[in-house]
Amino acid sequence: MIKLNNRKKINKSKTRVGRGIGSGKGKTSGRGVKGQKSRSGVAIKSFEGGQMPLYRRLPKRGFNPIGKKNIAILNLDQIQKYIDKKSIDTKNILNFNLLKKLRLIDNNFSKLKILGSGEIKDKININSVDVFFIGEDLSIFHSLKSLSSKLETFFIEKTNFSKNITRNDNFFLIDDSLYNFDEKISFLNKKNFKNFFILLKKENLGVFEKKNYKVFLKPLKIFELHKEICNKISKNIEEGDLWKLDRGKLKFFKNNKNYINLTEKEFYFLFFLLQRKGDPLTKKQLLNKVWNLSYNQNVSDTRVVETLVSRIRKKFKKVANPPKIIKDSYGYRLLI
């Protein structure tokens, strides 16, 4: 006779020990009667009767430091090889972010050391730090550092006022949390030093408003500050270096050499992001603009936007120095 309930249970519930004699695992909970193994807190797996255990007999080698930082090492002769292969353009300033962009350094590395083995025949500018932050408000520094490393735009470090301050090849962010802030700004003014932004609270604006200082008021919009710094430290971009969209051929191209073939949805997705010039578009706005869907039409759980973004990112990997699609709490941005 066939019964409907003759199948074995796939998801068996866990046996609850110590819940009465009738359960089968009641009185001693499956541990037997007395003895060392019935007690709690006894670890005898690595115990070998008192003799030297195996884990102590075997030799140990090396150690794993907790705060280890992966540092990429590059010699001068390696840089010359990259120049000879035309992997590095001598017109560009050689720094950590450029080497990451060109994929000459792995993304796992957090710092770069250039060693003196060999020689460089060609002239090239090497710069380790693009921006120095001077001040006590570390929240601004850390948010800028995480954003710049995520977008691979510039390298920022914290420094003291006296250190590196007279170097004209670097750029400085000076926060009003600095001790004797007014005196230090007047000192820079006397030296005709212009490579700096001032980060101020509204109540401290006063004198600085009348002078031609580049001032950012707190609370800061980090993306705006980041964009200003990029404009300040980067070279003039030629028209041929810009990424453009071809509506007729559905192509995203640069210099007529680097190009990406797009589907119709991918084209409109990039088109609307390009229009925003680095400002974000939310998922709701993208669904409305690209797919003509409102967020109320049972599409709150849809992942069409995420799928499209991952597809475009795969296409970007096939070209040199591609733009970046960034997702944050505000939405999606296209950074070129």
Image (cartoon, rainbow, N blue to C red):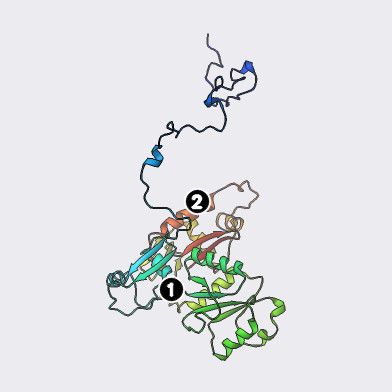
Q: Give residue 149's position: percent from left, percent from top.
A: 49, 65
Instruction: Name the residue type under label 2.
Output: Thr
Q: Residue furthest top?
A: 1
The tag earlier along the polypeptide, 2 or 1, is 1
Residue visible at 40% across and 59% down in the picture: 317
The residue identified by callout 2 is: 307
Whether label 2 touches label 1, CB < 8 Å: no
Image spot of residue 56 (x, y percent): 40, 41
Q: Nearer the viewer, residue 8 or 293?
A: 8
Q: Nearer the viewer, residue 200 or 332?
A: 200
State the residue at coordinates (46%, 74%): 129
Q: Which residue is mark 1?
A: 128
250 over 3 or under it: above or below: below
Please identify the residue farthest to the right as the structure is shown. Answer: 203
Q: Nearer the viewer, residue 191 or 3?
A: 191
Q: Residues within 10 Å of mark 2 (few under 14, many from 20)?
A: few
Helix, strand or loop for disc 2: helix
